Amino acid sequence: MSTSTIHGIIGYTITPFSAKGQDLDLDALGRSIDRLIESGVHAIAPLGSTGEGAYLSDAEWDQVAEFSIKQVNRRVPTIVSVSDLTTAKAVRRARFAERHGADVVMVLPASYWKLTEDEIYAHYRAIGESVGVPIMLYNNPATSGTDMSVDLILRIVKGVENVTMVKESTGDIQRMHKLHVLGEGLVPFYNGCNPLALEAFVAGAKGWCTAAPNLIPQLNLDLYQAVLNKDIAQARDLFYRQLPLLDFMLKGGLPATIKAGLRSTGLEVGDPRLPVFPLEEEAQRTLKDLLAALR
């Protein structure tokens, strides 16, 4: 797949569980994926932070990856997060995703030990050599504990042939500007920090990786279209309308807030898996008010 086909609003899926959080609910997962695609998102990304990929067993991860790719059925590109603690496990997941039809795999360098730049580079190189699909490099120190510098990111992009795109989630807009300048505009980058969506698009982001389309897809899509139309005034208005909800989602935790929001729309997807708690009642009321204000 050409990197140029990955653009716009990239919708991150949840992983639904049964009422007690013990079993996967693939039927609910299918309905949530269909909702996202029918809303008009430009790509689907299962098994990220929103999808609680870190809390699944290997067998569950395989089930969700295979089911999600099949459910999407190439209606839009599928970007599967294959991150794991060891290189061997990440390679296994990347190969599994590719074998079942993923268009792109996304890699966050998660590790118990703090990794050196050479270790991070070797991690990406091993995964790159194991698959033929494009790789989205994911930089999110808040969840991985590893903050990759722009220089390191560009070293990986230049040294690993199929690392062809970057998801940047540090919340530092200057990182995106620097990536654009030092990468000479040749490295597609994607915003992963919801409150920076407008600034990221202005800085040249090719897309926005977000769980927000589970709840407010049209506002997200309208913002992207306004940016494409170079109507910054309209884009600014659309962004600031949704910003209170975007902030709330980030502070409340994506699995908890998205699952509570989906429940309020009539789609039961269970609670997050422990140790993550479901959204408290007061926060649920706040979420409902925020959603009502946007309808």
Image (cartoon, rainbow, N blue to C red):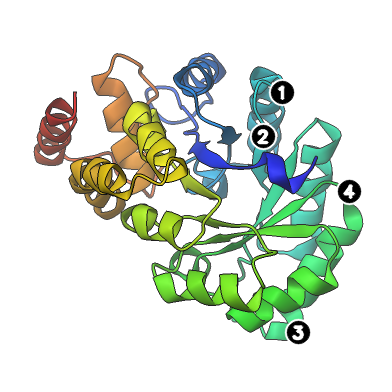
Q: Which mark is residue 118?
A: 3
Q: Inspect the image, locate mark 4, and give the three-letter code of the amino acid beneath it.
A: Gly
Q: Quadrant of the C terminus?
A: top left
Q: Inspect the image, locate mark 1, and give the three-letter code of the amino acid beneath it.
A: Arg
The residue at 49%/43% (across/down) is 52
Count neighbours of disc 3 (C-alpha within 10 A) and say few if under 14, some if 14 to 19, many if 20 or more: few
The residue at 31%/56% (across/down) is 195
Tell me the element at label 3.
Answer: helix
Circles 2 and 1, Cβ within 8 Å, touching? The answer is yes
Q: Between 105 and 218, which is closer to the camera in this rendering?
A: 218
Residue 150: percent from the left, percent from the top?
60, 78
Q: Which residue is mark 1?
A: 74
196 lies above or below 3: below
Q: CA distance from mark 2 to mark 1?
A: 7 Å
Q: Inspect the image, locate mark 2, and give the three-letter code of the amino acid beneath it.
A: Thr
213 lies above or below 159: above
Circles 1 and 4, Cβ within 8 Å, touching? The answer is no
- Number of marks drawn: 4
The residue at 72%/28% (across/down) is 66
> Which of the 4 image quadrants contains residue 218?
top left
Q: Which mark is residue 132?
A: 4
Tell me the element at label 1.
Answer: loop
250 lies above or below 75: below
Residue 289: percent from the left, percent from the top?
10, 31
Mark 3 or mark 4: name the one nearer the start of the chain.
3
Mark 2 or mark 4: name the one nearer the start of the chain.
2
Q: Which residue is mark 2?
A: 78
Residue 167: percent from the left, percent from the top?
57, 58
Q: CA distance from mark 2 to mark 4?
A: 15 Å
